[in-house]
Image (cartoon, rainbow, N blue to C red):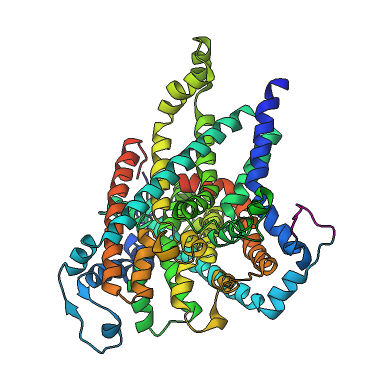
């Protein structure tokens, strides 16, 4: 016990420092306006109020941006999950030419600096007449979350024993049935994990929202709406923090939910 | 290895369910939205493509490598390239040092302490780049920021000096990215056979020696992967720089390649030039990726 006193204390201090910005964000969102301006800020509040949240939601219409972000992220999760599932089955359950090449390409795709592709994608989306729409955001995130989703799901599909499919086949199930009635439910935990990852990517995106949603402010997503809060001289920090909390909390919940899967999936070659 | 396309018993419609069909939806998305834009990026980088061409006022012209020679002769490009490389290198080093130190710390603490630290790290990891940036900006705000208040530095602007701004952005990035390193290395250390470390201890190695002589060499494959992932992430930092330094800092002093390409294209309407910067970035990251692939192969990951 005594031997662990020093490391335990260090760990606790580090944890406090690391968690402090999140705490400060939530705290500042709950502080009444007067306390935010205060010359001697204290790390607590005796008069928590929801006025910042109310201002953000009612005056600035953050509810709408929240829904926009949610629509984009959920659409990406569903589309990317389904398509990645099919591709993952192809890449694990079949042997064919260029299989390894394809796998390597999916890996390389994750390294592509997507930011650089905003320029050609901007013109592509413009030519489709899709600028200023949520559809444009769904489209690009669908494409960019796919490679990692395939790469992560591959492991989950491979973990299902072949015997289960063989048994189903002997029972007369068609391959279509095997795919959707047998494999799909068994991969569900993997789909949840990859889904969370796709959700976070789409939810957090600032770059494409900044590039594609130019004039239709009603179609903005949360990150851009947040940026609008910044004014040259007097930032409404209470509002910014309340809006930041609204944007952070959903991701935080999802993240804690699947953190273990995320780690093993991200680390790729790292084994548990 | 048994596969579901084996077996003569399967007939009719089922036979058409080949890997090709299963891959078709993915191809239908990735070819137009991923592969084609990469080709377009290359194409744009050899064109004279600015506002006049976008609006159709002037015809698009093929100008060969002019965009690239323009870049190479621009001092700004070299300073941005250097800043990007140094910034990424510093971030990787600090992230790795912090992550590794905390991973080792995790092995030495009680369960509840490890749990508390992991939870805090998860929260930092999960926070979106955007909101991580906003809260750090608030903490370091010139007038109302907690840091200035505590230090008694009211009026000190943390994004005014180039290095200050890079350090502040860097702190946010490290705060976001050390948890991945910490958790991955911790998992790696836990997977090491205990006997090896015990043997080192019996041979009289102190903790410092056993870390550098035993743990690090045995974790080399994992460390390599973590390093390369970090290089790739830190090289592509966009949101934090864009938001915290307001699009690249005063007079562009905090630009990195990513933000530079974006600004050239969308702020200055130099789409061709912006694309050329994008291509340079792509090539650098491709080189890093190839190293990564070789390491993956060597560590024996079956593809």
Please give left or right for residue B116 compared with residue B196 in the image.
Answer: right
Q: Residue at x 15, y 73 (%)?
A: B63
Front residue of A7 and B180: A7
Question: Is residue A45 a member of the stretch shown in magenta?
Answer: yes
Q: Quadrant of residue B297?
A: top left
* Residue B173 visible in the snapshot: yes
* Residue B219 spot, x, y in % from top left: 43, 31
Residue B185 is situated, as x and y percent measured from the top left of the image, at: 50, 36
Residue furthest bottom as drawn: B57
Name the image quarter holding residue B89.
top left
Residue at (68, 31) in percent of width and height: A8
**Where residue A40 sits: x, y (%)?**
75, 55
Q: Which residues are magenta?
A: A39-46
Nearest the viewer among B49 and B188 is: B49
So how many labels did they put on this image?
Answer: 0
Question: Which image quarter holds the N terminus of chain B?
Answer: top left
Q: Is residue B299 magenta?
A: no
Q: Looking at the figure, which quarter contains the C terminus of chain B? A: top left
Secondary structure mostly seen in magenta is: loop
Residue beneath the point at 68% across and 20% down: A3
From this view, report whether residue B209 is shown above or below residue A151: above
Any part of residue A268 in sight: no
Residue B19 vs residue A20: left or right? Answer: left
Tell which of B116 and B251 is nearer to you: B251
* Residue furthest right in the image: A46
Q: Using the image, determine if residue B74 lies above or below residue A151.
A: below
Residue B105 x/y as whole percent: 59, 31
């Amino acid at each position: 016990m005594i031997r662990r006193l020093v490391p335990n204390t260090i760990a606790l201090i580090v944890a406090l420092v690391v968690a402090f910005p999140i705490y400060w964000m939530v705290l500042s969102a709950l502080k009444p306006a007067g306390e935010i301006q205060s010359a001697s800020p204290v790390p607590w509040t005796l008069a928590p109020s929801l006025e910042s949240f109310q201002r953000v939601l009612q005056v600035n219409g953050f509810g709408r941006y929240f829904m926009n972000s949610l629509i984009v992220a959920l659409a990406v999760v569903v589309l990317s999950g389904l398509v990645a599932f099919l591709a993952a089955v192809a890449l694990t359950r079949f042997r064919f030419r260029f299989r390894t090449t394809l796998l390597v390409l999916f890996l390389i795709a994750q390294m592509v600096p997507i930011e650089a592709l905003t320029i050609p994608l901007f013109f592509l989306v413009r030519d489709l007449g899709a600028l200023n729409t949520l559809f444009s955001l769904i489209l690009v995130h669908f494409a960019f979350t796919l490679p990692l989703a395939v790469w992560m799901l591959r492991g989950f599909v491979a973990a299902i024993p072949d015997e289960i499919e063989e048994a189903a086949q002997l029972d007369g199930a068609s391959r279509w049935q095997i795919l959707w009635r047998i494999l799909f439910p068994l991969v569900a935990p993997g789909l949840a994990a990859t889904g969370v990852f796709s959700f976070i990517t789409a939810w957090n995106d600032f770059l494409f929202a900044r590039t594609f949603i130019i004039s239709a402010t009603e179609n903005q997503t949360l990150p851009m709406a947040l940026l609008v809060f910044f004014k040259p001289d007097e930032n409404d920090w209470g509002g910014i923090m309340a809006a930041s909390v609204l944007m952070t909390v959903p991701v935080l919940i999802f993240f804690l939910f699947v953190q273990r899967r995320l780690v093993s999936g991200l680390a790729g070659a790292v084994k548990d | 290895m048994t596969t579901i396309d084996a077996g003569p018993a399967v007939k009719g419609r089922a036979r058409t369910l080949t890997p090709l069909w299963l891959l078709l939806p993915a191809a239908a998305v990735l070819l137009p939205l991923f592969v084609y834009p990469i080709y377009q990026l290359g194409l744009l980088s050899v064109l004279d493509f600015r506002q006049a061409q976008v609006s159709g006022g002037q015809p698009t012209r093929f100008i060969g490598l002019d965009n690239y020679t323009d870049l190479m002769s621009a001092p700004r490009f070299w300073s941005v390239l250097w800043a990007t490389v140094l910034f990424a290198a510093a971030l990787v080093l600090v992230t790795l040092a912090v992550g590794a130190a905390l991973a080792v710390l995790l092995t030495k603490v009680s369960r509840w302490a490890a749990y508390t630290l992991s939870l805090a790290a998860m929260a930092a990891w999960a926070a979106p780049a955007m909101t991580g940036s906003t809260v750090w900006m608030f903490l370091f705000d010139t007038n109302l920021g907690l840091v200035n208040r505590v230090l008694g530095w009211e009026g000190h602007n943390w994004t005014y000096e180039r290095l200050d701004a890079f350090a502040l952005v860097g702190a946010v990035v490290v705060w976001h990215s050390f948890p991945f390193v910490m958790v991955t290395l911790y998992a790696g250390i836990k997977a090491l056979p205990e006997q090896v470390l015990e043997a080192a201890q019996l041979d009289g190695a102190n903790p410092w020696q056993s870390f550098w002589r035993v743990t690090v060499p045995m974790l080399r494959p994992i460390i390599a992967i973590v390093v390369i992932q970090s290089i790739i992430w830190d090289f592509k930092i966009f949101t934090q720089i864009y938001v915290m330094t307001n699009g690249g800092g005063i007079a562009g002093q905090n630009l990195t390649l990513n933000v530079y390409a974006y600004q050239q294209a969308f702020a200055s309407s130099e789409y061709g030039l912006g694309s050329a910067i994008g291509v340079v970035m792509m090539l650098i990251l491709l080189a890093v990726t190839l190293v990564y692939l070789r390491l993956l192969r060597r560590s024996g990951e079956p593809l």
